[in-house]
Structures are given as structure tokens and as C-alpha cells.
Image (spheres, helix red, strand yellow):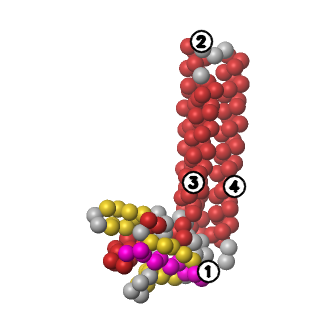
């Protein structure tokens, strides 16, 4: 049973790192990236729909994102959704496509973005540590119930700590890469 707790904890820790990576993709750097706008939800015929399901999103130039909706009637809704989002970009609508020009980041804005990266990294670390605590509690409960021996429980808890250390290191590496991207001029 305790190996189930370990494998479940490992799966959830890996998922926490994946979620962190996906969240960090949405943080703006000095370059254009489709991941900045893919998850913006647009009100389309009364339904909140992700932008990437309504339009083709491309990066024709290093500092520009082009959104070409498959249905032109949704252009206004896309513009409103972008303005409501927290990406801080102003859309230019030219009748058929929406263009987003990515301005160069100021030093102050870069520092703010690095703070956002660090905050999200800490949230991921806390999530991983909570998963460790839950799995450790499950192992200790099994030990108290007599399902697992003391030595086996101790080995499982050590293994759990090694897993936790490994995933926290992954979070740190992922965050460091994103911080490097944000600070790159």
C-alpha cells in the first residue's frame, strides 16, 4: 500500500511541475510567443471558449503575434477578451486579423515579472511539500496499523524525501530558465 502512496505522490509532483511550466509560458518575455494568448477565454455565442479554438495564432515577426479568427464576427469579442486579460497588450484589429505588438520590456517591468516567476515557483514548491506531507502521513498510518514494518516505512519516507528534493530541484531549474528569458534583453 505504501508504494501506492509513493507512486501517487510522484505522479502528483510531476503534475505540479507541468502546471508550473504551463503557467510560466504565459508570463511575457521580450519575445512574442503564442502561449501568451492561447489560454485567453473569449465569449463566443454565450460560451467561454479558449482563443486557440477560435482562431489561428502565429508569430510572423519576433515582436508580433497575429490572431486570425476562423469566423470574422468574433473579432470584437477577441479584442475585448485581450483587453480584459492581464497580459498588458493592446490589440490592433484590421478587419480580418488581430495583431498584438510586443513592446520591449523596461527594467522595472522585468523585475516585476521575475517576482511573478518567483511567486509561482514558491506556490509549486509548497504544493510539492504538501504532497510529501500527505504521502508521509499515509505511510505512518500504515505503520501504525501494522500493514508496513518500521524499517520499510522508514525507507519509504526516505524515498519520499528524495522524490520531493528531485521535484523541488526541477521547479528551481524551470524557474531559473524562465527568469533568464525574462531578464534577456
Spatial separation of the CA atoms under disc 1 and disc 2: 61 Å
Q: Are marks 1 and 2 in contact (CB under 8 Å)?
A: no
Q: Predominant secondary structure in magenta?
A: strand
Return the disc, 2 or 3, that comes first in the chain's sequence.
3
Who comes first in sequence, dot 1 or dot 2?
1
For the image shown, how many numbered marks are present on the structure?
A: 4
**Residue that appears at 60% across and 49% down:** 17
Can residue 129 be seen in this snapshot?
no
Q: Which stretch appears magenta?
A: 60-71
Residue at 62% x, 38% y: name it: 10
Q: Examine the image and state in which quarter residue 177 appears.
A: bottom right
Mark 3 crowdedness (10 Å alpha carbons): few <14, some 14-19, many ≥20: many
User: Relative to residue 134, is residue 172 drawn left or right?
Assistant: right
CB contact under 8 Å: marks 3 and 1: no
Q: Residue furthest bottom?
A: 94
Residue 20 disc label: 3
Identify the residue under disc 2: 146
Q: Residues within 10 Å of mark 1 (few under 14, many from 20)?
A: few
| Mark 4–mark 2 distance (CA, rounded to whole Å) | 39 Å
Amino acid at each position: 500500500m505504501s508504494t501506492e502512496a509513493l507512486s501517487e505522490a510522484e505522479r502528483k509532483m510531476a503534475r505540479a511541475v507541468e502546471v508550473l511550466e504551463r503557467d510560466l509560458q504565459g508570463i511575457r518575455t521580450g519575445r512574442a510567443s503564442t502561449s501568451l494568448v492561447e489560454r485567453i477565454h473569449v465569449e463566443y455565442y454565450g460560451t467561454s471558449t479558449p482563443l486557440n479554438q477560435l482562431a489561428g495564432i502565429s508569430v510572423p515577426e519576433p515582436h508580433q503575434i497575429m490572431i486570425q479568427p476562423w469566423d470574422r464576427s468574433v473579432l470584437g469579442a477577441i479584442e475585448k477578451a485581450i483587453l480584459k486579460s492581464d497580459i498588458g497588450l493592446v490589440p490592433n484589429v484590421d478587419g480580418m486579423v488581430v495583431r498584438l505588438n510586443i513592446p520591449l520590456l523596461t527594467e522595472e517591468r522585468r523585475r516585476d515579472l521575475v517576482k511573478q516567476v518567483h511567486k509561482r515557483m514558491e506556490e509549486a514548491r509548497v504544493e510539492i511539500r504538501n504532497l510529501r506531507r500527505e504521502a508521509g502521513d499515509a505511510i505512518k498510518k500504515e505503520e501504525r496499523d501494522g500493514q508496513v514494518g518500521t524499517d520499510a516505512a522508514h525507507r519509504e519516507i526516505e524515498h519520499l524525501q528524495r522524490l520531493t528534493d528531485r521535484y523541488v530541484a526541477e521547479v528551481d531549474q524551470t524557474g531559473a530558465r524562465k527568469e533568464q528569458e525574462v531578464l534577456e534583453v
